[in-house]
Structure formats: structure tokens, C-alpha cells
Image: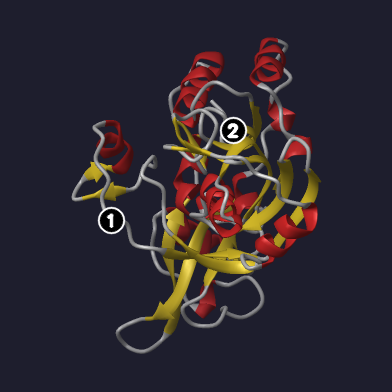
Amino acid sequence: MYNGILLLNKEEGFTSHDAVAKLRGILRFRRIGHAGTLDPMAVGLLVMLLGNATRASEYASGSDKEYIAEFILGVETDTQDTTGTVVRQQASACSQDQVAQALAQFAGGYWQTPPMYSALQQDGVRLYDLARKGREVERQARFVELPRLELLSFDPLAQRGCLSVCCSKGTYIRTLCHDLGQALGCGAAMSRLQRTRVGDFRLEDALTLEQVALLQQQGQLAPHVLPTDRVFSALPAVTVTEEGARRARNGAHLASKHLASGLLPPEECLCRVYDQAGAFLMTGKTGRLDIGQPAIFCHKNFAE
């Protein structure tokens, strides 16, 4: 069994859940998850979490992401992409300048209403289940951050374009394409989506399922499994004494005396905790004991 992160280059035609199932079949163990869902039509980077790395799912899923998205103007669908049923179609004659000007209003971020075809829940029911029954319910808009939004190309004859997007967690790129079409007054649908980055992980370092299967068969997959603590690389790190390592493995709090060197991070701060051999033990959160003494409390335990 592996413990760590495997970067998968997902192909079109299957869900993120399907990718987990396929990887379980290749690796012959079940403790596998993923960080950040990709729809069946989407391709690109899917961060797979193996073994104890599944405990990092929540943190890994919250990382910012980058995409390349293609869209077509003059058409709207019920899913906001070209896999859905066309609900409106009209002639479009937008110029590249018009598209760029309309896109500029979304730069930096905007209040986005999630699509009906999404896994979000309302009263315990997935929105896509309601949508498949022909029901539409009111959804609350959420502010999504778009620190980079660029029109890479636009073909005025085909009325097709391509975007580069860097966005925060929870952003629906197909909804961004749909909203761009609304801003232009002609409608739009996403026609292709490729994820190229999740946090510090990049598509160029990812493997296809076929490559994973071959490397596993050859006994050469292990070098491609990244250490779990890569997910937390932005957090400050502390090294603890032998006694501190024992306490960390048991999920106990750590005081200043348990640090091998350095100081406790600021209060209410997440941090990485290592033993003196460099083994990643846990993520901790700084706080105070009842007696007022500063300490690091176990947030997620990754010790073997």
C-alpha cells in the first residue's frame, strides 16, 4: 500500500469517482480518495490521495486551481456545457474586443450562482437530482475569486473562444462561461475544460491511468508517489523531540518544551510537525491549554 499523493491526468468520459475505482483496481487497495472533483467531460489534473493522505482531502480540496476552458457563443444548455440539452440558440456576431470587455467585469472575482447540475445539496438533496426531475430551485450566490482571467483566443467566424482561469475553491467554470454569454446578450456554453494546476501540483507532472498501470506492473510507481506533507507546504514547520514525537503519534498536545528547536507558531495557526528524523507526524493547530500555556493541538494525525 502507498501513502502519499499521485497526480493523475484524467481523460474525458468518466467521473472523479470512476477514477478512484479504476485506481483501486490497479493498485489493489481501497484507501484512495481525490481532492477536487472533475466532471466527466473535463480532463487534466486530478490529485489522488493514497493511504493516510486521504486525511488531507479537506485541505487539498481548498487549494486554488487553474484551468483552460473553451466556449461557444450563441447557445445555452441546461448543464451550461455542450454535453447538455440546448435550451436557447441564437445568432451571435461578437468581436474579440467585445468578448474581452465583457470578460473584464468578472476579473478579480464576482458573485456566482451555482448551476442546478451540481453536487451541492439543498435540504439534503443533490441539485443535479432535482434538475433531472425538471425542478429548479433558488440557489444562493457565492463570491468566487478569479485572480487571473485571460482571453487566450477568440475566433469571430466560429464564435468560439478559449480562457485561462485561476480561481478559488467552489468556482464553476461552466457557469463562468454561461455568465459571460449573459453579459454579451447571446448566451454561451463551455465546450471543453482542462485543469492544469491544483495548489502547487501541476498537470505536467501527472500520469495517465495507462501509465500508472504500466509503472505498477513494473514495480516502478513508488517514485511517482509524492509525500503527503506536500499538500501542506505553505504551512510553517516545527521539529519535536523524541518525547514530543511520541506524544504527536498518540494525538497529545505539544508544549514549548517538546520542540527540538525554534518557537511555537502564532496562536490559531496551522503547522506541520516532524520528528528529528524528518518524518511527517501531523498537522497541528496552536492554541492555549486551560492553564493559559501555549501549545500545539493535533489537527490531523499522519503518523504511521
Dot 2 falls on a residue whose secondary structure is loop
Q: How is the image coloured?
A: secondary structure
| 171 vs 92, nearest the viewer | 92
| 32 vs 302, nearest the viewer | 32
In the image, taking residue 66 as reference, residue 142 lies left or right, namely left
Q: Which residue shows up at 24% across the image and 40% down it?
A: 135
Q: Residue 222: give x, y in percent of width and height.
A: 69, 27
Q: Which residue shows up at 53% across the image and 25% down it?
A: 1
Q: Residue 132: give x, y in percent of width and height.
A: 29, 31
Q: Which residue shows up at 36% across the image and 89% down it?
A: 292
Residue at the limit of the structure toward the bottom, as seen here: 292
Going by the numbered disc 1, the residue's amino acid type is Glu
> Residue 5: in sight, yes or no?
no
| Image label count | 2
Q: Which residue shows up at 53% across the image and 55% down it?
A: 182
Distance between mark 2 and mark 1 Cα atoms: 26 Å
Residue 138 circle label? 1
Going by the numbered disc 2, the residue's amino acid type is Ala
| 262 vs 220, nearest the viewer | 220
Identify residue for label 2.
42
Mark 2 or mark 1, whichever is nearer to me: 1
In the image, residue 187 above or below residue 133: below
**Earlier-in-chain disc, 2 versus 1:** 2
Dot 1 falls on a residue whose secondary structure is loop
Crowdedness of circle 2 by 10 Å Cα count: few (<14), some, many (20+)?
Answer: many
| 177 vs 126, nearest the viewer | 177
> Residue 248: in sight, yes or no?
yes
Residue 256 circle label? none
In the image, residue 106 above or below residue 174: below
Tell me which corner region of the image, top left, top right, bottom left or bottom right, holds residue 113.
Answer: bottom left
